[in-house]
Structure formats: structure tokens, C-alpha cells
Image: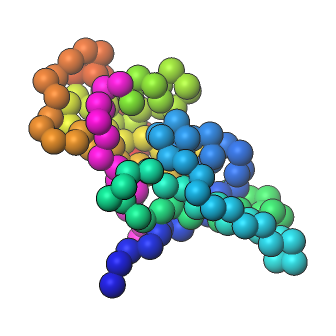
Amino acid sequence: MRFLHAMVRVLDLDAALRFFSLLGLQQVRRSDHEAGRYSLVFLSTGHPEDAATVELTWNWDQAEPYGTGRAFGHLAYAVRDIYALCQHLADNGVEILRPPRDGRMAFVKSPDGISVELLQEGAALPPAEPWSSMPNRGSW
């Protein structure tokens, strides 16, 4: 058995694609289904040892945001430099909800409220400002 993908429903496909591209994910497949009025977009990290994808499901006629429910936890990604990625995200308007104060872990949310955990690959980086003294915000 092998893991294929995790699916999340999105209200605004363009906003979701922008967010996940800021994380470094790339679109690898897309199918639009006129009869069912939905699109499926599959995103990959591009890492050669990472075959799993995130499937964004966009129902064209959905007008109300989806509830996020407590059964789903989060998506998690190992990153090369957590400080650089968090700065890149912040510079592009993404709120860092749980800053990487420990040089190891941070949380952000997609435009649809999907919680995303960022974990420093390998050993934690030494604590650094502005991250060390930033408080948590909201929920993740």
C-alpha cells in the first residue's frame, strides 16, 4: 500500500493555488468536469522521494465557505529553512499563527482555513528574531 493524496475543498481556487505556491507546491495535474461543475487540482512538493499530493477540489457553484471540522488536523511539510519560508509567507500576506520560535515548527492556514504545519528539516535552527519573541495568534 502507498499513500496517494489528501483532499481539501477550496472556495476560491486562485487564492488556494497562490497560497500553496508560496509554500513551494507545484501543480502536477488538473481536470475540469463541466458536467459535475467541479475541478480537481493536484499539487506536489516536487521532491523525488515524495509521491503523495494534495488534491484541491473546487466546486464551481459553492458560495459559502466550507466548515473545517475537528476531525481533520493539518497538512505537514518538512522545509529546508523554516525562517526563510516563514519570512516569504509573511512578506506575501500569510499570517504566521504559530511562529518558529524554537527554530523547528510553525503553523499557517490556507485561505480556506486548512492548517499547515511547517517543520524544519533535520536539526532545529538556532532561535532567531523576530521569530523568538513573536506570540501565537488565533488557532491552528
Q: In the visual, does 80 lie left or right of 68? A: left
- Model colouring: rainbow
Residue 105 visible somewhere in the drawing: no
Above or below, 73 against 93 in this view is below
Of 11 and 48, which appears nearest the observer? Answer: 48
Work out which residue is located at the far bottom of the displayed protein and give it: 1
Above or below, 120 against 131 in this view is below
- Asked whether residue 36 is drawn in magenta, I would say no
Classify residue 127 by image quadrant.
top left
Classify residue 137 by image quadrant.
top left
Q: Position of residue 116 (x, y in %)?
A: 41, 49
Residue 95 visible somewhere in the drawing: yes
Q: Position of residue 50 (x, y in %)?
A: 36, 59
Q: Position of residue 64 (x, y in %)?
A: 74, 59
Work out which residue is located at the far front of the displayed protein and give it: 48
Q: Residue at x 47, y 40 (%)?
A: 23
Of 107 and 81, which appears nearest the observer? Answer: 81
Q: Residue at x 87, y 71 (%)?
A: 34
Work out which residue is located at the far right of the displayed protein and give it: 35
Q: Which residues are magenta?
A: 71-84
Q: Residue at x 56, y 27 (%)?
A: 93
Above or below, 98 against 75 in this view is above
